[in-house]
Amino acid sequence: MKLISPFHIFFTVLCLIISGTSLASNTSPDALHLLRSMTQSFSTLSYDGVFVHSEATNMNSMRVRHGLMNGVEYESLVDLDGDKIEVLRIDDKIISVYPNAMVANTRAPLIPPFRRFKDVESDRLIKGYEMVISDNTSRIAGRKVVTVKLVPKDQYRYGHQFWLDEENHFLLKHDMMKIDGKLLERIQFTSVNFAPDLKDKDFIPKEGSYAESVVDTPPRRVKNLWQFDWLPKGFSLVWPEARSLNHGTSMLLLSDGMTTVSVFIEPTMKPKSMSILNMGATIAGERSIKVKDQLYLLTMVGEVPEPTIEKLMTVFMPRLEHD
């Protein structure tokens, strides 16, 4: 299993996307309906499947199980490569399970890869993507699928292709691609059962394992003191306020309805020129900015092309005092 950087953990745990309701006339309602149905299927269907997640030179297989029993939602994600690491979710309670304490201290948390598809936001999506339902028929994991493509309208975002189960619209395969068509990331099921015989005891940590409850404390809301002088079409701030994290760090979140860019700003003593770190589909950037006598470290992380992060970092500035 590949180790996940702190950037990835920040990005995945804190990214929240707000669902929209209105449609515009220049996009396909059928494509939007399929994407919305896909997001609902993650929590409404029962399933037991194995999928492969590949990115750059890294690849690992995982088993996911999900069910609704007596009004309670249960979910399990197990890494099938290397040490057996499992994430259990019972409604809003999350438990990480490791073979022993030693593994728990040396391995990064297991991150559910479907979380970023939990919501799609129509108003933003139609500004940044053309949505196309493919006429081609195919099968994934032995099941017939319908294919939805998200084609970027500019160079500031990646393209996406979704293969959805023809019957229930469950996501069986997802590709993220550069504008030139080069594959960046793929999630693909190799087998899935939509009528699994699941019991609540299947979601209890096994005796002898090492389990830790994950407590997700909502960050404190604070006044947003920052703004962007420019944003790609479709991108806008998800929250009107900033979120206060540890050590004086504030966080903002941008979204185009499919992709998010996390923005972190914190006081610093050391000047830093702009640097860009490429982590497969994820790009991270850092630079310091000076406001009056105070120096700040600006960090941005998102699954967007490198020029997007570079430009966003140059148009980030303090809000005008009268705003």
Image (cartoon, rainbow, N blue to C red):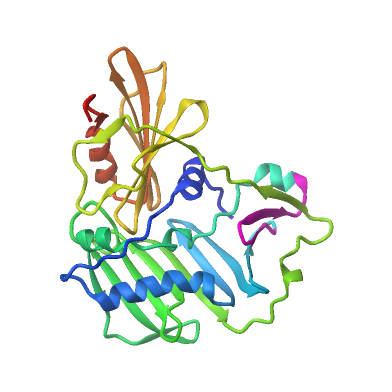
Q: State the residue lying farthest toward the left.
A: 26
Residue 23 percent location from the top left of the image: 24, 68
- Location of the C terminus by quadrant is top left
Q: Classify residue 102 by image quadrant.
A: top right
Determine whether, in the image, residue 281 is placed left or right of residue 196: left
Which residue is at 29% across, 19% downward?
A: 290
List the single residue furthest toward the top: 293
Residue 172 lies, with reference to residue 113, above or below; the image says: below
Q: Position of residue 187 (x, y in %)?
A: 46, 67
In the rendered image, the residue lying farthest to the front is: 322
Q: Position of residue 211 (x, y in %)?
A: 74, 52
**In the rendered image, the vertical position of residue 82 relative to residue 72, given as above or below:** above
At x 28%, y 64%, the residue is 122
Residue sitting nearer the eye, 174 or 2 = 174
Task: Let me know if residue 91 is in the magenta part.
Answer: yes
Q: Residue at x 69, y 42 (%)?
A: 105
Viewer-proximal residue among 96 and 125: 125
Reply yes or no: does residue 272 show up in magenta.
no
- Residue 47's place in the image compared with 84, above or below, is below
Q: Residue furthest right?
A: 208
Prevailing secondary structure of the magenta residues: strand
Q: Which residues are magenta?
A: 84-101
Judging depth in this view, the residue of 96 and 39 nearest the camera is 39
**In the image, what residue occupies the spot 56% across and 48% down?**
3
Q: Position of residue 172 (x, y in %)?
A: 46, 75
